[in-house]
Amino acid sequence: MQVDIYDTTLRDGAQREGLSLTVNDKLKIASKVAELGVAYIEGGWPGSNPKDDEFFARAQDEIDFGDSELVAFGSTRRPMGRADDDANLAALLEANTKTICIVGKSWDYHVTDALETTLEEGVRMAADSVAYLKSKGRRVFFDAEHFFDGYKRNPKYALEVCQAALEEGADCIVLCDTNGGTLPHDVAAIVSEVFDALGGDVKLGVHFHNDSGCAVANSLVAVEKGVTHVQGCINGLGERTGNANLVEVIPNLVLKMGIDCVPLDRLRNLTETAHFVAEVSNTPLNPHAPYVGAAAFTHKAGLHVSAISRRPDAYEHIDPELVGNSSRLVVSELAGRSTVMLKSKELGIDLSARPEVVTEVLTKLKNLEHIGYHFEAADGSFELLVRTAAGWKPDYFTLESFRVIMEKRADGGVATEATIKVHAKGERIIATAEGNGPVNALDRALRKAIGQIYEDLKEVHLTDYKVRVLDPDKGTAAVTRVLIDSTDGHTSWSTIGVSENIIEASWQALQDSIVLGILRSQARQSAGH
Ligand SMILES: [Zn+2]
């Protein structure tokens, strides 16, 4: 059996309170979700805001959708209007996607009280809109809004709306639990009744919100009852309590129910996709999230550590590699040591004969993590920690001092300037640079100071700069953690800084980033390419 996964992270997911995605963010997320191999990716609501218009204008040129298909979302025509001169439907066609999803009301109460029109007109709105979009050669999905609540109160009307959309050629009728309060046993009963009423061969989909904590369970129950299209969002993003979490729905369908919805080799991208979307949307992923969380396969097992490493299948519900995650052992001194050795080996540093270095790394790691460092997210800084513990002393440059000045003018203008004094190759160098912010100015000043000596630094640039306040209840005196992602076009690395002073935290991360940039370029040179 095959189920189409319909990702609505960019539209319904973006309704999450506090979430704001730029067009570039949306493009990045769309191309990441496409790597997962889901059937459909809903891009947004064309005509509703300039961001979504720009997204649709760019997405089809800039993104390789692979096996996924981009979908434009909108609503049925307005009450008492005509489909062929409806601005919303016109904008949907202009978005130029093969598939369009339109939402229409299937709860009588909403038709009469929210739309303030008659029930007959409610049915016609659905029918006309589907018919019009079908006449333009599009595949059309009909989202029956508030279907489950509507069905409980007036099943005849809820079905009538769906039937009308179906008769005009809708390719899938999506039953939506818009208020998110429906429980699995109701879903099972209602979905069966809908199949009975509309015919067993009708293509049904579902769209669940998570207000009763059952969105994923409801989606699975619906599939068990014959539904072959499931909507949801990466990491369960969405307004209120969110939408059905595709990061849970997908592996449950594939690995537990044996249902084909994304290819097995793509399923391995799941963990990366979840983390990527969390980063880009700035909505931190719960480390205890099923399947993809950092702790999802972490064992705090004490005496059983050796048993777990010998027989992981006895302690894990799936092989974590199937979803791109991995097992971790924590707590015991032993497990900690082996983790450090394993990671160091990955970096090309063999610590197997140097137990004292491992001890030092572990001690530093514990102390630093205690004050807010988080090396999981900063492989680059971890690498420097291991290298220095192993005896490496980077002598590329040493800081004498830096100073950052920011000026805010009455006309609204802001100017930032940084001056840095460093010693490099026996020279004392002073450089000043302006920037669009303190960190940017500091970055430029440092590069100006040592860029002549380390020419390859011009290839190195920062790709992301993230700030997280660690104990927000302290207000502006809280500790700040800065993460910087950098790349030299060959590899990328992440570095970290922690301080009560945001510029100091940024400097630590920046300094690590530049040191690694020089280290990488020198390693490439000595390898002869
Ligand atoms: Zn929704």
Image (cartoon, rainbow, N blue to C red):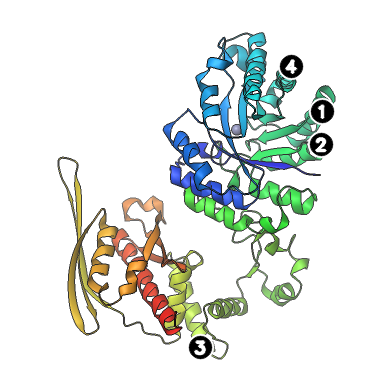
N-terminal label among 3 and 2: 2
Tag in front: 1 or 3: 1
Disc number at residue 195? 1
Dots 2, 4 in contact, CB < 8 A: no
Other residues around mark 1 within 10 Å, as few (<14) / some (14–19) / many (≥20): some
Coordinates of residue 160 in the picture (x, y in percent): 74, 16
Amino acid carrying label 3: it is Glu
Q: Residue at x 50, y 88 (%)?
A: 356
The reply to whether the C-beta atoms of the residues labelled 2 and 1 are less than 8 Å apart is yes
Q: The residue under label 1 is which amino acid type? A: Phe
In the image as oriented, which residue stretches furthest toward the left? 410
Q: Which residue is mark 4?
A: 160
475 versus 456 height, above or below: above
Q: Which residue is mark 3?
A: 356
Q: Residue at label 2?
A: 225
Residue 147 on image: x %, y %: 69, 25
The reply, left or right, for residue 506 in relation to residue 192 is left
Q: Quadrant of the N terminus?
A: top right
Q: Earlier in the sequence, mark 3 or mark 4?
A: 4
Q: Which mark is residue 436?
A: none
The quarter of the image that holds ligand 1 is top right
Q: N-terminal of the two: label 4 or label 1?
A: 4
Amino acid type, label 2: Lys
Q: Secondary structure at mark 4?
A: helix
Q: Report how far apart the C-alphas of labels 4 and 1 lie in the structure.
A: 13 Å
Q: CA distance from mark 2 to mark 1?
A: 9 Å
- In the rendered view, tell whether residue 405 sits above or below residue 101: below
Please report the residue visible at 74 percent of the width from the left and 19 percent of the height from the top: 167
Mark 3 residue element: helix
Q: N-terminal of the two: label 2 or label 4? A: 4
In the rendering, at what x and y percent does residue 526 appear? 42, 84
